[in-house]
Amino acid sequence: MPTDCLFCRIVAGDIPSTKLHEDDLVIAIRDITPQAPTHVLVLPTAHIASAAELTDADGPLLGHLFVVAASVARQEGLDGGWRLVSNVGDDGGQTVDHLHVHLLGGRPMTWPPG
Ligand code: AMP
Ligand code: ZN
């Protein structure tokens, strides 16, 4: 576990977070700076820098991550729909180098996102 990684430290419990889901593979936490009424981050417990680092072997992990995201969306009552976004690299707007998917909902989402 990279000790300088914010999300690894959150997974380890060294930094507090509001966890909505936790298992061996994936956690879901509330984003500290919400951009929508529901803004949750779903991330693997293992350190993977970004979606650019994924391989075919990560398929089951990603499948589980999407199932958890859908489950959290249901728990949050996002019956009208929701959005998943994963930023990659500087141009993609990634600020934390540990793979995470933003789950956004609770208001209509605009497209393109800007
Ligand atoms: P990204 O810019 O796609 O890398 O997303 C990083 C996200 O992490 C941003 O939406 C931040 O608001 C969020 N964030 C940063 N620090 C924390 C924290 N301590 N707890 C929860 N979310 C955080
Ligand atoms: Zn990490």
Image (tube, helix red, strand yellow):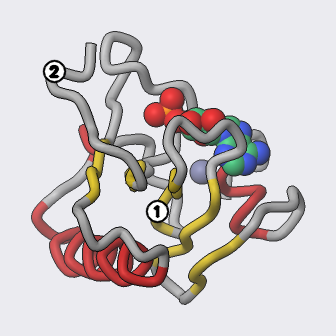
Name which residue lies at 27% across and 81% down. Answer: 67
- Residue 104: percent from left, percent from top: 40, 50
Q: Is residue 51 left or right of residue 44?
A: left
Residue 105 location (% of width, % of height): 38, 53
Specify whether 20 is left or right of 87: right
Name the residue: 36% across, 71% down.
69
103 sits left or right of 29 in the view: left
Secondary element at tag 1? strand
Q: Residue at x 23, y 68 (%)?
A: 58
In the rendered view of the protein, which quadrant contains the C terminus? top left
Vertical order, 16 against 73 (above or below): above
Q: Which secondary structure lies at badge 2?
A: loop
- Badge 1 density bin: few <14, some 14–19, many ≥20, Cα 10 Å: many
Decide which of tag 1 and tag 2 comes sooner along the chain.
1
Q: Which mark is residue 61?
A: none
Q: Tell me residue 23's x, y (percent).
A: 55, 88
Q: Residue at x 28, y 44 (%)?
A: 51
Q: Is mark 2 within 8 Å of ligand 1?
A: no
Q: Please indicate, yes or no, whether residue 88 appears anywhere in the rendered image.
A: yes
The correct choice, above or below, for 28 with respect to 39 in the image is: below
What's the amino acid at mark 2?
Answer: Pro
The image quadrant in which ligand 1 is located? top right
Q: Residue most toward the left?
A: 56
Q: CA distance from mark 1 to mark 2?
A: 22 Å
Name which quarter of the figure residue 106 lies in.
Answer: bottom left
Tell me which corner region of the image, top left, top right, bottom left or bottom right, holds residue 72.
Answer: bottom left
Query: Can I make out residue 5 in this image?
Result: no
Which one is nearer the viewer's eye here, 50 or 87?
Answer: 87
Q: Nearer the viewer, residue 105 or 41?
A: 105
Q: Which residue is mark 2?
A: 112
Which residue position is annotated with label 1?
42
